[in-house]
Amino acid sequence: MSIHVRINNQIQAPELRVIMEDGGNLGVISFKEALDKAREAGLDLIEISPKANPPVAKIMDYGKFQYAENKKQKVAKTKSHTVEIKNIQVKVGTGDHDLELKAKKASGWLKQGNRIKIDLFLPGRTKYMDKKFLRERMDRVLNLITEKYKIADEARSSPKGLSIIIERS
């Protein structure tokens, strides 16, 4: 998963902005001069930012650099959280107790940071019922959810019926 970094003779830029291992700035110097300074210190010349103008290079031990980069990537990976969309399906005639159970489940998922898609399943003729009535049925579930949420995607018709997506606010 590591990105390819050019070091020492792999660097192609004629001039580089060079930074020392301790953070000191040597300024913009020629590639040859930078490479000589790195060799004097017994370290490597590593191209940090190749797209900058002029490119930025750092004089440091390549092994330490790789270790630090891998550590940064691991920390970033642990901090990233993939948001899943969980589904809850209810029908027009779903009873109050079942709605409470589904709302409790939805509250738990919201607490974990997931998005929730609530489908009001409309088989057969129920698809043609009054939109206001169907919206009230959807609101029954939404009112039972204990966790704070916001509507990410308004209620809209879907092939199965009516769908709405909510997420933690």
Image: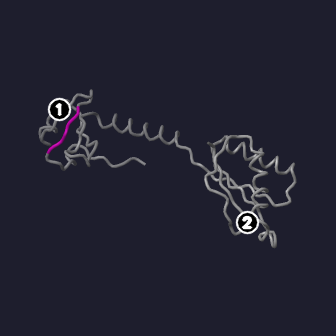
In the figure, residue 95 lies in which quadrant? bottom right
In magenta segment, residue 137: no
Which of 29/4 is in front? 29
Work out how far the residue at label 1 is from the one at label 2, CA to CA, in angstroms: 66 Å
In the displayed structure, does residue 39 sit left or right of residue 112?
left
Q: Residues within 10 Å of mark 1 (few under 14, many from 20)?
A: few
In the displayed structure, does residue 42 sit left or right of residue 65?
left
State which quarter of the image contains the C terminus. top right
Q: Position of residue 137 (x, y in %)?
A: 79, 56
Q: Position of residue 126 (x, y in %)?
A: 81, 69
Q: In the image, what residue occupies the spot 15% across and 38% down? A: 28
From the viewer's perspective, is residue 41 above or below residue 161?
above
Residue highlighted by disc 1: 26
Q: Which residues are magenta?
A: 15-19
Q: Secondary structure at mark 1?
A: strand
Q: Amino acid at mark 1?
A: Leu
Residue highlighted by disc 2: 161
Q: Viewer-nearest of labels 1 and 2?
A: 2
Q: In the image, what residue occupies the spot 67% across and 51% down? A: 116
Q: In the image, what residue occupies the spot 39% across and 47% down? A: 2
Q: Which label's residue is closer to the chain start, 1 or 2?
A: 1
Q: In the image, what residue occupies the spot 42% across and 40% down? A: 70
Which of 48/119 is in front? 119
Which of 58/49 is in front? 49
Q: Position of residue 46 (x, y in %)?
A: 26, 40
Q: Amino acid at mark 2?
A: Gly
Q: Secondary structure at mark 2?
A: strand
Q: How would you classify the magenta stretch by its main secondary structure?
A: strand
